[in-house]
Each structure stands twice: as structure tokens, then as C-alpha cells.
Image: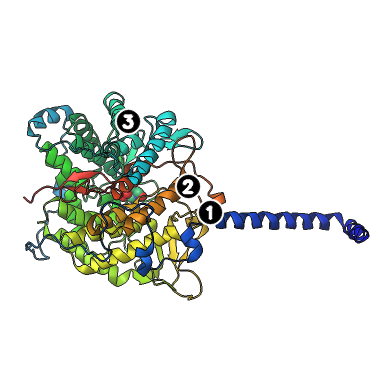
Amino acid sequence: MILKNRLNLKEWNRLPRFLRFVIIILLVVCFLSLIYVYSAFRELPLKMKKSKLVQQNDITKITFPISFTESLKKDQQVKPQNNEQIEVFGKGQQIETPHNKSKKEVKKVTSKDVVKQILGQKEEKPFEAAGPTNPYQKAVVDAFKHAWKGYREYAWGQDHLKPVSKSFHNWFGVGLTLIDALDTMYVMGLKKEFQEAREWIANKLNFNINKDVNFFETTIRVLGGLLSTYHLTQDSLFLEKAIDIGNRLMPCFKTQSGVPYSDVNLQSGTVHPPSWSIDSSVSEVSTIQLEFRDLSRVTGRTEYEEAAFHVSKHLHTLPKKDGLVPMFINTDTGKFRTRSTITLGARADTYYEYLLKQWIQTGRNITWLKEDYMEAIEGVMKNLVRKSKPNQLVFVGELLNGKKYSPKMDHLVCFLSGTLVLGYHYGMPISHLRLAEQLINTCYQMYANTATFLSPEIAHFNLKNEKSSDIIIKSNDAHNLLRPETVESLWYMYYFTRNETYRSWGWNIFQGFERYTKVKTGGYTTINDVRHPLFVNPRDMMESFFLGETLKYFYLLFSDQQELSLDKYVINSEAHPLPIYSAR
Ligand code: DMJ
């Protein structure tokens, strides 16, 4: 035996050195791959080992680790609570023309003066936070505290924490994460943290900076965040700051068509389109109305609402494909860029969201908003919805150049279930609820079918091959940015149906974030690859919406009561609650 081994060794030594080297390398690679496959398999959630896809019919079989206090049946459906007859205007309704309005000089309003004037009008009571009431909410509050710890230590007052390098990133230079997170802290009952952030707002926040900011992002995150915090707390400091930033954003509306530019300098008021395009994104120009209307309603100054609503009225008059809009619009002509992609994802998504939410915010009597929304959802069902193979997952694809179907869906599209079930609550057809149920299942599968239990940024769906899997993840799309849309929709679905499955799904997703995005020293990071648990490759960035939206929606999802009433508030695109006004 020993002799034989010696002979083998001799033969081995006789091989050319290069060949021996290659063989050794191959053996090492095989060995490492075996370890990788073994450990990746160990990381898979239990359910994944049993079946690749959880079927829609199986959703009630998923067990939630601790039973919640209220548990209602899966098939309990939401009933429309509004049976009122709504006045219907004809399609040819006269709309104000853009030009006169947009060219009107926007008068500067000093925030302190206005706040003084309106303080007598306080009618709302501050929101009373219950604080976490079960282990799930506690886990989310702990996650928030962990994120905040990193931000406080390494990025205080800056826009974003870079948790891995323990540094920060500035986009607009206005303390974006701190402002975006204000109402989350308030709702969670984190008084100490909130107070410290308030101090920073009172003493350090300065919008008078020579900095170009994105109009839409600043509106939904900063203006929206300050306004919602004002409503929840009734603290005039936040209103004062909201008026200040609102005034600095107003020059964007000074275009030939009234359709706003994408960027503005906070100090000089100089405006311009994005560096990469002459046009503005349709989602951006149509997702500012809730915030500017609210600013008008609390200040009594109509110019904010008029300028922003003028854009919606203008979009209403433009030709569309079955109510669906392209991605880009020109600020001079006010026309859509024809042959651009039709999608419910990036650059168009929130146009649809704000049609419905503006209708709700204004007391449900501006009928064309509701009609445009209903027409658009019909258009989505007709042109964009398909089922994948082999498991019939319902998804919302895109029309490239407005024509060619592509089975690609951004994670961003997952907001749609939440919007659809909210619409159903206010009397939209049952088909909207059905689509919401099917789509949220697909969005959940985008998480459940990766080894990290985290969704990729973009999924492609299989329309052809019965034998391969439903969801295809391409390397360029495999990142996860800690986005909120699926958790957002899970909250809306749970809020209206009380179906516990949605909370169990949320809990599984929450654990994915905890396991693969948490950075020991504080904060959570975006990752490059959701497919490989051992090589997620952190991107070193904690987006402000992780605190503003994702963790807030998790907290609300795990709440045993309807903590934030959807009959009282409409939630903006960045998860900031604003009051619903009665019809005028
Ligand atoms: C957020 O800033 C908002 O939800 C926006 O409407 C879409 N993108 C991010 C979160 O993904």
C-alpha cells in the first residue's frame, strides 16, 4: 500500500510543474465551492428547503412565530366604507391653462410671520404614541435604535450614514436622514432621540445654502417630513422650517408650461433640468402635490397648492395610452416625450399613487382625479399585467418605447398593492383588491426566493420555459437598497384585511434585513448581491428612506391596533402622514 502510494507520488512528481499547479488550483476551487454551497444551503430559511415557491394558496400555512393578539381569517375581505354617490364631471371639463399661473411671481413668505399668524388656528391634538406593545414592534424599535446609533456617531446632521466606513455622504447637505426619520421616532415613542433631533433642527438646520437639490426628493423627504412632524407634534418649529424650504423650492415652477424643473439652488433659486436630460421625470412632477397642498392649507397661502395642482391639471389634459403615462415630460412644451417606456416602476410609479391620494386628501370630490386613477388601473390590467411560468406569479411589466412588452418589474412597483387596497377601501372595484393580493404575493416571492430572503432591485419574470424558475435575477439588478415598497404594501394589506399572513411575511423579510444588512458598529447597509449570503458585498450606504419609510412601515405592520388612522391621514410617497381635508 505504502509502496503504491510512493509510486503515485513519483508519477505525480513526474507531471510538469505547471500541470501540477493547475490541478492543485482546481482542487482548491472545488473544495471552496463545496464549502460555499454547504453554508449557503444552511443559511436558507427553512421553508425554502422544502419548496422553491410558496404558492398563493399556501399563504395561510406559513406559521408566525408568536401569535398576534388579533387574528382574523385570510379570506376576510375589505368592504368599501364609502357608498356615497360621487359627482361625475364630463371629460371636457375646463382646466386653467398653465401659462398665466406659472409666470405669476411667487411672493416670498417669511416663515416666522406665517407661523405667528396661524398659531391661533391650532385644531389638531398632538399624536399620542403608544410605544412598542409586542416583541415584533420591540425588535423594530431596536433596529431603529441601532441605525440611529450609527447615524448619531458617524454622520450626525449629514444626509446619509456610510456605516461600513463609519463616515457619511452628503447629497443635498440638509440632514436628510435626520429629517426623514423625525416622524418615525415620534410614532415609535422615542422621546429622547426625537428631542435631540429637534435641537439640531432648531439650532443647526440651515436651508440658506449654495446647493442644488432635487425638487421632488426634497419635497417628499424634507417638506413632507417637516409637515408631518408638525401635524403629529403641533410644534411650530417644524412648520416654520417647512415654510422656509417650501419657499426655496417654489422657483422650480417658473417654467413656460408650469411643469417644474427637476433641480433648484436653495440659496439663489436658480433652476435647471437634470444634467442627463432636457426633460423632467413624470413621477417627479406629479409627486409633490400632497405636500404643497398641505403647506397651503396650514398657512392659508394658496400659491403653493395652486402651482403644484396646476401640474396635475395639466397632466390630466395630455393624451395617454389607456390612462398610462410615459416616463418624461418637457418643461417648455409641457408635452410627454413620446416613445418613452411605460412602467409602474422608476420615473412614473408615483404619478398613479398621487392621483388616488390627492383625491383622498381633498375629501374625494375632485372627480377627475378618481377617474384618471381608475382608467390607469384598467390600463395596467390590460397592458402590463401578466403571469409567469411555471407558478403563475402575477407581475406588472413594462412597454418599451411605449410598445414592446418586457417582463421586467422594479421592486418600486411593489408600492402598488398598498395603493390598490387603499383605493378599494374608498370604493374602487373588487378587481383592484384582487390585483393587490396577487401582486403582494409576487413581491413577497421576490424576497422568499433568494438565499438572503431579500429582494433584488429588479426582477425579470419567465414567460416561456415551464422548467426554469419564475423569477430571474440578473447580476446588474441583484442589489438591495433597503427599499420600503413591499413592507409598505404589507402594512396597507394588513391594515385593511387583518390577514395575519401579511405580518408573517413582514417578519421573514425583517429577519433578512437583520441578518444581511446590519452593520455591527451601527447602521444598516445597502448590499450588492442578494443571491449569495456569503458575498452580499456591502455598498456602504444607509438611505434616509430606511429610517423614514422601511422601519416605520415595519413598526406599523406589527402594531396590534390601527395606530395611524388611514381615515385621518394620507401617507405621502416617503411615508410621511398628512391630514385628510374635507371637501371644499
Ligand atoms: C423613496 O424615496 C420614495 O418612496 C419614492 O417615492 C420612491 N423611492 C424611494 C424608496 O424606494
Q: Where 218 falls versus 368 (above or below)?
A: above
Give the amino acid at mark 1. Glu
Q: Mark 1 to mark 3: distance in Å?
A: 35 Å
Identify the residue shown where x is 8% and y is 64%: 88
Q: Residue furthest top?
A: 203
Which residue lies under the disc numbered 2?
515
**SS category of the residue bearing label 1:** helix
Of residues 485 and 65, which is closer to you in this image? 65
Q: Percent from the top left, x then y, of residue 456?
A: 45, 56
The type of residue carrying mark 3 is Glu
- What is the quadrant of the N terminus in the image? bottom right
Given the image, on which type of amino acid does mark 2 rest?
Arg
The image position of residue 495, as x and y in percent, is 24, 54
Label 1 within 8 A of ligand 1 by Cβ: no
Q: Which of marks 2 and 3 is nearer the N terminus?
A: 3
Confirm or deny contact between disc 2 and disc 3 (CB under 8 A). no
The label on residue 43 is: 1
> Circle 3 — which element?
helix
The answer to whether residue 216 is visible is yes
The answer to whether residue 217 is left or right of residue 229 is right
Which label number is shown at residue 193? Answer: 3
Q: Determine whether label 2 and label 1 are within 8 Å by CB.
A: yes
Label 2, label 3: how far apart the Cα atoms are? 25 Å
Q: Measuring from the top left, give residue 158's x and y in whole percent.
A: 38, 32
